[in-house]
């Protein structure tokens, strides 16, 4: 298994194309399982779930900046600085942006069970978030993702083709949460969304803010390698 850390802010559509190329290579056996770590430019994405795309009326002011909106769909106008993309992953609407760690595992699933694969991803994130000393870190049946108490800290939405996975995980670390108020993220009220920085205190916050990507990526890479060292 190899791990690639992509620096800077990556456009969502550009990364979607790269994932498809990597899926082709992994499916043919040309490359090993590959896990991508990155941050996206601000974007709202809509998966294959039943949730209809649309904005929450009256919430543009939550973003805290001067904006001009643009028409995107019959039910959605977005600020000019946020892109919009339809995607083949599972799930509904969500937001990606700077300060949020996005993880795209391109993995050949030896155990042909999407549910089992999702549970592995949840377990990796639960263990990582709990390692910061937080209590009641959990995954919920019927609400894929990772929660700390009643707050959602990570979203998970995947796609699988030829039993090779793509798309994946988004962990809120130090990103702005205001853009979630433009939508109902995965059907939930946006107030449930949380970020790791706010759930920590004192020295833990300071440590997280200093080189958070390096620390998280290094730890998550070890967890991925261990979780998928057995049949995946």
Image: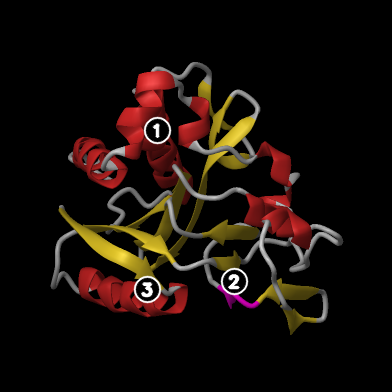
Residues 66 and 92: in front is: 66
Of residues 91 and 66, the one nearer the viewer is 66
Identified at 25% across, 63% down, the residue is 6
Q: Residue furthest front?
A: 66
Residue picked out by circle 2: 82
According to the image, label 1 marks what residue?
123
For mark 2, give the secondary structure: loop
The residue singled out by tag 3 in the image is: 15
**Could you say where residue 167 lies in the image, as x and y percent from the top left?**
42, 62
**Residue 7 appears left or right of 53:** left
Q: In 3D space, how far apart are the residues under numbered discs 3 and 2 (Cα atoms)?
A: 16 Å
Residue at 40% in and 28% down? 205
User: In this orientation, does residue 79 appear?
Assistant: yes
Image vertical order of residue 36 relative to residue 195, above or below: below
Question: Which scheme is used to colour this image of the protein?
Answer: secondary structure
The percent coordinates of residue 213 (x first, y second) are 29, 46
Q: Position of residue 27 (x, y in %)?
A: 25, 70
Residue bounds of the magenta highlight: 80-86
Q: Quadrant of residue 224?
A: top left
Instruction: Identify the mark nearer the N-term, 3 or 2.
Output: 3
């Amino acid at each position: 298994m190899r791990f690639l850390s992509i620096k800077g802010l990556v456009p969502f559509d550009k990364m979607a194309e790269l994932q498809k190329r990597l899926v082709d290579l992994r499916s043919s056996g040309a490359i090993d399982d590959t896990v991508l770590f990155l941050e996206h430019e601000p974007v709202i994405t809509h998966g294959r779930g039943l949730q209809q795309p649309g904005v929450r009326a009256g919430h543009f002011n939550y973003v805290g900046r001067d904006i001009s909106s643009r028409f995107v769909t019959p039910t959605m106008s977005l600020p000019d600085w946020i892109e919009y993309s339809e995607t083949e992953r599972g799930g509904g609407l969500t937001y990606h942006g700077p300060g949020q760690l996005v993880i795209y595992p391109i993995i050949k699933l030896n155990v042909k069970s999407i549910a089992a694969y999702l549970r592995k991803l949840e377990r990796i994130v639960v263990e990582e978030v709990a390692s910061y000393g937080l209590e009641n870190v959990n995954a919920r049946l019927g609400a894929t993702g990772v929660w700390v108490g009643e707050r959602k800290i990570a979203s998970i939405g995947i796609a699988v083709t030829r039993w090779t996975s793509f798309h994946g995980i988004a962990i809120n670390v130090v990103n702005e949460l205001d853009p979630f108020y433009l939508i109902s993220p995965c059907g939930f009220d946006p107030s449930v969304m949380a970020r790791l920085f706010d759930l920590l205190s004192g020295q833990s916050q300071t440590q997280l803010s200093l080189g958070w990507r390096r620390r998280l990526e290094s730890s998550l890479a070890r967890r991925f390698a261990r979780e998928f060292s057995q049949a995946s």
